[in-house]
Image (cartoon, rainbow, N blue to C red):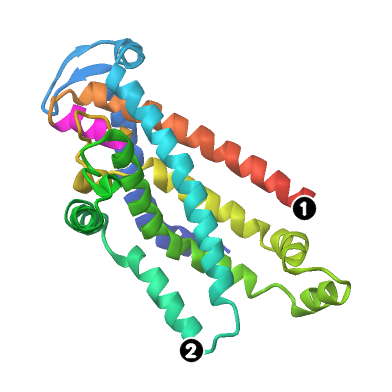
């Protein structure tokens, strides 16, 4: 028994050491630096809660919080609706075409955020301008030079990237829905909508919980797409929280203040994620 315990801890030790060095110690240092004036090289003063107090009077940071919240809501809805729709499509009996569709829809998720940002930047700046010149529709002009269209540009990019990944999660649950249930619903006179809402959706409710958690947490943490597509412009109007924190740390060199922003952002994300999991899991039992 003692040999088994020693073996257990022997194999677990490298993982625990890595967690300690890479996660726990840096996290503790980050909390400490958030109470100081730190420029990345030295701590010049201990300021207590001043960094946290200044957050609420930082107009750009507060704006980026609201902008990120709006982006997350729009993205979560779009990704889950499109992801579920794609999953419903590829689970139809289409033979090898279904496998082809799954591959094509999942491929955007394999592309890095920076590359995706530049791809869609080309589409919005070049392709949309070409469409505007051909059709005379001004709606396609200046998509990244305006706050509203820049916002929707970011949403489109993120939805396009994540929908295929979320589709795979829904597909795995849809494939496990017993065919007998669907046949019984059809015999009882249920139409397509009733069969989906009353039979399929309760069966895939856990997939909705997982997908909502993944899309919500990833939407709040977007940085590379934001940097590559709009760089926060025009004039910081499309700057998300992660970019605001990065700019504060590495451009303004106020790393202590940036760390305070990061800690507050972590608390917000954790609270929202836990609340979402509680509500959706409670909803699962009701379904």
- Dominant secondary structure of the residues highlighted in magenta in the image: helix
- The answer to which image quadrant residue 112 occupies is bottom left
- From this view, report whether residue 265 is shown above or below residue 23: above
Is 244 contained in the magenta span? yes
Q: Where is residue 36? Give x, y as percent.
A: 24, 17
Q: Quadrant of the N terminus?
A: bottom right
- Work out whether residue 3 can be spotted: no
Q: CA distance from mark 1 to mark 2?
A: 34 Å
The magenta stretch is: 242-250
257 to the left or right of 19: left
287 to the left or right of 11: right
Q: Where is residue 180? Give x, y as percent.
A: 80, 79
Residue marked by disc 1: 287
Identify the residue at horizontal 78%, vertical 48% (top origin).
286
Identify the residue at horizontal 30%, vertical 45% (top origin).
139
Q: Where is residue 271? Give x, y as percent.
A: 52, 33
Identify the residue at horizontal 40%, vertical 54% (top origin).
159
273 to the left or right of 197: left
Is 154 contained in the magenta span? no
- The answer to which image quadrant residue 178 occupies is bottom right
- From this view, report whether residue 22 is shown above or below residue 95: above
Residue marked by disc 2: 96
Q: Residue furthest bottom?
A: 95
């Amino acid at each position: 028994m003692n040999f088994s315990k020693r073996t257990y801890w022997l194999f677990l030790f490298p993982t625990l050491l890595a967690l300690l060095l890479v996660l726990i110690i840096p996290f503790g240092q980050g909390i400490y630096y958030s109470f100081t004036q730190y420029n990345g090289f030295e701590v010049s003063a201990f300021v207590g809660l001043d960094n946290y107090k200044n957050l609420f009077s930082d107009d750009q940071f507060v704006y980026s919080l609201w902008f990120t919240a709006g982006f997350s809501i729009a993205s979560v809805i779009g990704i889950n609706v499109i992801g579920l729709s794609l999953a419903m499509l590829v689970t139809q009996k289409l033979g090898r075409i279904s496998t082809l569709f799954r591959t094509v829809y999942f491929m955007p998720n394999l592309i890095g955020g920076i590359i995706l940002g530049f791809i869609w930047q080309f589409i919005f700046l070049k392709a949309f301008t070409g469409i505007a010149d051909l059709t005379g529709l001004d709606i396609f002009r200046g998509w990244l030079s305006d706050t509203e269209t820049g916002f929707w540009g970011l949403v489109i990019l993120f939805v396009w990237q994540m929908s295929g990944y979320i589709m795979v999660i829904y597909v795995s649950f849809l494939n496990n829905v017993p065919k007998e249930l669907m046949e019984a619903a059809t015999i009882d006179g249920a139409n397509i909508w009733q069969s989906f809402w009353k039979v399929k959706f309760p069966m895939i409710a856990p997939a909705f919980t997982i997908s909502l958690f993944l899309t919500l947490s990833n939407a709040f943490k977007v940085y590379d797409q934001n940097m590559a597509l709009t760089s926060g412009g025009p004039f910081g109007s499309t700057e998300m929280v992660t970019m605001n924190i990065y700019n504060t740390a590495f451009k303004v060199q106020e790393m202590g203040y940036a760390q305070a922003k990061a800690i507050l952002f972590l608390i917000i994300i954790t609270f929202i994620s836990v609340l979402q999991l509680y509500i959706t899991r409670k909803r699962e039992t009701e379904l």
